[in-house]
Amino acid sequence: MKRIVVLGSTGSIGRQTLDIVRQLPDQLQVVGLAANRSAEELQDQAREFGVTDIALMDEKTAQAAGIPGGMNAVVDLATRHKADLVVVAVAGVIGLQPTLAAIQADKQIALASKEVLVAAGHLVMPLINERGITMTPIDSEHSAIFQCLQGYEAKHLHSIILTASGGPFRGWTAEQIRDVTLEQALNHPTWRMGGKITIDSASMMNKGLEMIEAHWLFGLPISQVEVVVHPQSIVHSMVRFHDGSVLGQMGWPDMRLPIQYALVYPERLPNALRPWNPAETPQLTFEPVDETVFRSLALARRAADEGGLMPSILNAANEEAVNALLAGTGSFAGLMDLVESVMDQPSGTDTSLGGILAADAWAREQVRDRLRV
Ligand SMILES: NC(=O)c1ccc[n+]([C@@H]2O[C@H](COP(=O)([O-])OP(=O)(O)OC[C@H]3O[C@@H](n4cnc5c(N)ncnc54)[C@H](OP(=O)(O)O)[C@@H]3O)[C@@H](O)[C@H]2O)c1
């Protein structure tokens, strides 16, 4: 029996994580749950799974609901003695402190919050290695790569090929994208996800962030992380070995499979999910990304190459701009100009946790300033 804490249990990944726990009651037990403001849903989940340890990040909501609140309460939950594995599925870089604390408390990590590695891979990965912690990726692409690499040594890996659905604007010109609405950007062709990641998929910044995530997780330079558009979202990503052989992992676009693998790794347990069948899939196609339209990939490569605080700045500026867009401010077409203009400003050099949080706050303020103009 693995005892798990779910940070972000009321979100898209969090709910699907609980779905897997329902399917595997003899292998998984929930011992802690955390969210931001969804007090009622959190309490319903706690009742269903018999959990007494819960927390909300938002202190006001927590106080009103009589639930422990704030960063300290979430960190406390992530480091409790009785947990074996912490699922980090909160939206954004806010998951960084609880992740670092959980690693320091020798918990296994199942990571959905890619922003944690984007902003602080240089802090997270050495700690993971130092403490001998298993960190399983939940992102379907990274799960695919992780699965393909089982049984191989790092020295065999030549490059990583991340697949991207291409989002709702695949094949569009920059001119056509200029006037798209928020509703169009939220209309993802293959995956149903939270709002932030859906917008990131439409701009392909999600793939940019995933390139940086893959660079940290699998120890390859960003130049060896490629992206290919695969509209059917069946091949979840591939690895290329030095002998030229390429392996991929296939499945229907359903996050519950990578979530299950991340939770019960290295087991392969039967479940109620529909197994993929090649004969039911009419055609699998692959095409290059048009980087003149989707500038997010070049910005991500630039951030990884410059290193230091730049990935945190890219991530924070993008997150703030996307959240503003979701709240009705700014335009989808203007997102990358906004992010780039923040990256072009001089920034600091302190890459400690404090420095990252300060850079994150600074980049958000820069975006808010620009959107007020
Ligand atoms: N959705 C997917 O299919 C998918 C796939 C791959 C990777 N991911 C990654 O998984 C992470 C979560 O994505 P999602 O789609 O599940 O997001 P989501 O549906 O927006 O859910 C976010 C969760 O995080 C909580 N949260 C939000 N702000 C928080 C804060 N300041 N402090 C603590 N908790 C906070 C939310 O609580 P409240 O309900 O209280 O707001 C909710 O439980 C993201 O990093 C995303 O990139 C998602």
Image (spheres, rainbow, N blue to C red):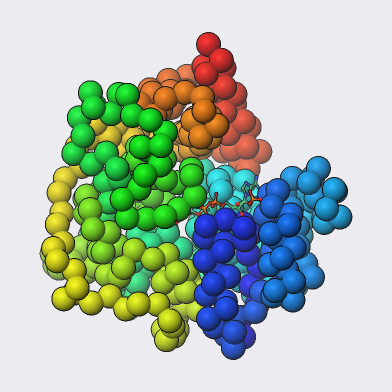
Residue 303, position in %: x, y?
40, 35
**Going 66% across and 62% down the picture, which residue do you hit?**
102
- Tell me: residue 47, above or below residue 334: below
Image quarter for residue 11? Answer: bottom right
Q: Residue at x 20, y 30 (%)?
A: 173
Left or right of 241, for residue 55: right
Q: Is residue 29 left or right of residue 20?
A: right
46 or 1, which lies in front?
Answer: 46
Instruction: Name the spot of residue 45 as percent of width and height, x first.
Output: 68, 67
Q: Residue at x 57, y 22 (%)?
A: 368
Residue at the image point whose x is 49% and y is 50% from the top? 194
Determine which quarter of the picture holds residue 286. Answer: bottom left
Q: Is residue 125 above or below residue 280?
A: above
Position of residue 119 measured from the top left corner of the image (x, y, whole percent): 51, 43
Does residue 127 show up? Answer: no
Side of 35 where 208 appears, left or right: left
Q: Quadrant of the N terminus?
A: bottom right
Does the rendering let one see residue 188? yes
| Frontmost residue, 280 versus 163 | 280
Q: Is residue 54 left or right of residue 280?
A: right
Please state the horizontal and vertical placement of residue 96, each as a whole percent of the image.
60, 50
Quadrant housing residue 282: bottom left
Please state the total of marks drawn on the protein image. 0
Q: Nearer the viewer, residue 108 or 241?
A: 108
- Figure check: 285 above or below 63: below
